[in-house]
Amino acid sequence: MDQQIAQKDLTQAQAQQDKAVLATPGPEYQRTIPGTVTRFLGQAAPYLMGGAMGPAGPMVMATQMSETGYADTFDRDAAAARKAHPEWTEDQVFSSAHKAGLEAAQTGFENGVVMGLLPVPKVGPLIARMVEQVGMRGTYMTVAGASQDIEQNIAIQKNADPKQAIYDGVLAHAPANFVAGAAFGVPEAAGESL
């Protein structure tokens, strides 16, 4: 009886997962302009809330960058390890990916703290200060994201694939990093008008 219930639950869970996969836009959509815009907005949304956290904002930013750094690097390192070392067991792949992910998470945390604490000068009229706030945070995040991308690539190069290019993905991620940083600056900019 318990096995039947467990099997039914497993079947229902698999059916829900299959429906979710079918509803997910494919890679073709992701390459379109609407797909790119929705990806940028989706990546930026958590940073919008981080910017609204006031004095806790830098820690929220650091936590978000740390988590993102770990997850991205873990996945990329595991794929690189499987490709570069087909003889490795899954435990070896996991160990390599985990080690690289931890390195990237530490760098992401450090970058997030610095990015969140960097001041934005307050000069000029209100609208100019608001635009400056968003633009400076976007620029700070672009630099922090580039630093994090380089660190992730170094971690992958060190742990899984010695042929990993150090600057891989830095330019490709710059627009999304700018949008995420700008989203972090929106609540600060809105606060300028209060």
Image (spheres, helix red, strand yellow):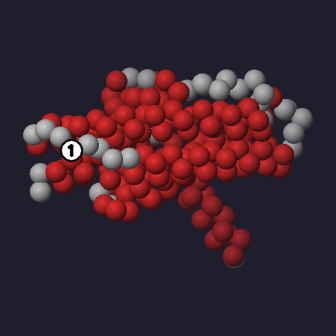
Q: Residue at x 71, y 71 (%)?
A: 3
Decide: is 168 above or below 77.
above
Q: Is residue 12 left or right of residue 4?
A: left
Front residue (pair 51, 87): 51
Front residue (pair 86, 61): 61
Dot 1 falls on a residue whose secondary structure is loop
Q: Is residue 153 left or right of residue 42?
A: right
Q: Where is residue 194 in the image (x, y as percent from the top left)?
A: 12, 57
The answer to which image quadrant residue 41 occupies is top left
Q: Residue at x 37, y 34 (%)?
A: 139
Q: How many labels does the image show?
A: 1
Mark 1 surroundings: few (<14), some (14-19) or many (≥20) residues within 10 A: few
Q: In which quarter of the image is the N terminus?
A: bottom right
Q: Residue at x 60, y 49 (%)?
A: 105
One can see residue 122 in this view: yes
Q: Where is residue 49 in the image (x, y as percent from the top left)?
A: 33, 55
Front residue (pair 42, 135): 135
Q: Name the residue under label 1.
A: 122
Residue most toward the right?
87
Residue most toward the bottom?
1
Q: Is residue 186 left or right of residue 77?
A: left
Q: Which residue is drawn at 60% across and 65% down?
A: 9
Under mark 1, the amino acid is: Lys
